[in-house]
Amino acid sequence: MKEFLYSTTKLIKELLSFPESTKAYGFNEIIDINSIKEINESYEEKISAIDGGTSEIIRLPTFSIVLNRIYCNCFIGMKKLDYFDRCTFISLTRMINDNGKILYETKILHFIEGKLNIKFPIVDSYSEEMRIGKNRGDISRVISMARRFGEWEFVRNALKSGAKIILMDGSLQTSFPGESEFVRNIYDEIEKNNSIIAGLSKTSTIFTENGLPISGFLEYLGRKKGLLKWAVKIGKSEEWASRAIIYFVKLHENSDRCYRLDVYEKANEEDIEKLLSSLALNSKYFAYPGYPYALIDAHNLARVGRDEALYIRNLIFDLLDIEDIRKLEESEQIAHKILDELG
């Protein structure tokens, strides 16, 4: 046991031996101690944060009915302004067998509050974006399309707030078929309004060329340079984010972690400075220092409770006869059993 502990400790130390400089794997920027820059709180621009939430109402292997909610707000510093917008809607995603070709169609069935003008692309289960290895993508990979496209469309609503900065929850990476084409028009709107769009991710799997977690290496550089709030540009990568430049940021001196920040590639140096400063001034919530409060607010008000989805499910069941309900519940149980067996 003693030999095992010694060899394992030695291996861990070797793995955590940080180099003087490196790159994030798949990215173009060399990262060293000179790459890490202090964030100054010299600008305070309006921020509109966007987030979405979902809860399934009915889920079968061939179709899913989902309750979705999209929300945006407006902040300056830690002060929440009057503007907000919200849309709650029910979407349907279903399988279509087109002469043996498995396709998925998504559409909005009903708006509960607000409106969205979106036409979702029909998805080929064997498309590059949908496949899992050599296998076709199943419906579980498509049902979040309504939420994702809704969040992108809500950028137009957020711009109405007069915000300089549009902040998305998560990365700016596009992963659904047709999403890049859809987002191109959104970026055009951003440029016309002279605004900045960025996406902040709570977690990241990006690693260095040496195989180290990028966040650990950057935290090491920050400590070495004696900075409490900092930003590091790690560059561009088609694999990790198209049409975006990736940064890692630590937005508060008491934060215990840094976050991945995707910024639209057309942002200039002054835009970046305004973005980082404004985010830092919005990240002073005592319970979660270093994370933008605008995103916390958006998350809370976009959340869809399970009870909301169950209420709509019960309304549907009230209109079905007993035999239909039995068939539906049996089909759901089979679907869940298969998923459980898959782990």
Image (cartoon, rainbow, N blue to C red):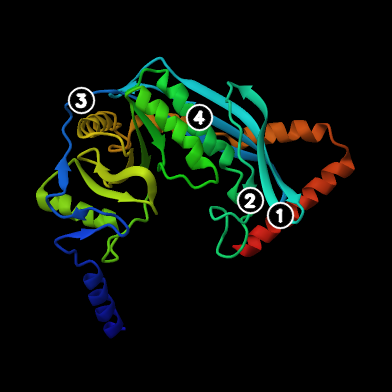
Q: Amino acid at mark 1?
A: Lys
Q: CA distance from mark 4 to mark 2?
A: 22 Å
Disc 4 designates what residue?
Answer: 153
Q: CA distance from mark 3 to mark 2?
A: 46 Å
User: Residue at horizontal 25%, vertical 70%?
Assistant: 15
Q: Earlier in the sequence, mark 3 or mark 4?
A: 3
Label 3 Cα crowd, 10 Å radius (few <14 / some 14-19 / many 20+): some
Which mark is nearer the camera, 4 or 2?
A: 2
| 102, 259: nearer the viewer | 102
Mark 3 and mark 4 residues within 8 Å of each other at the beta carbon: no
| 125, 341: nearer the viewer | 125
The image's mark for residue 43 is: 3
Q: In the image, is 110 to the left or to the right of 268?
A: right
Disc 1 designates what residue?
Answer: 101
Element on which disc 2 rests: strand
Q: Earlier in the sequence, mark 4 or mark 1?
A: 1
- Viewport quadrant of the N terminus: bottom left
Which mark is nearer the camera, 3 or 2?
A: 2
Please, is residue 285 above or below residue 97 in the view?
above
Label 1 Cα crowd, 10 Å radius (few <14 / some 14-19 / many 20+): few
Q: Earlier in the sequence, mark 2 or mark 1?
A: 1
User: Residue at horizontal 61%, vertical 40%?
Assistant: 121
Q: In the image, is 149 to the left or to the right of 173?
A: right
Which mark is nearer the camera, 1 or 3?
A: 1
Q: Amino acid at mark 2?
A: Asp
Total count of labels? 4
Give the image quarter of residue 42.
Answer: top left
| x then y, percent, for residue 87 | 56, 25
Mark 4 and mark 1 residues within 8 Å of each other at the beta carbon: no
Element on which disc 1 rests: strand
Disc 2 designates what residue?
Answer: 124
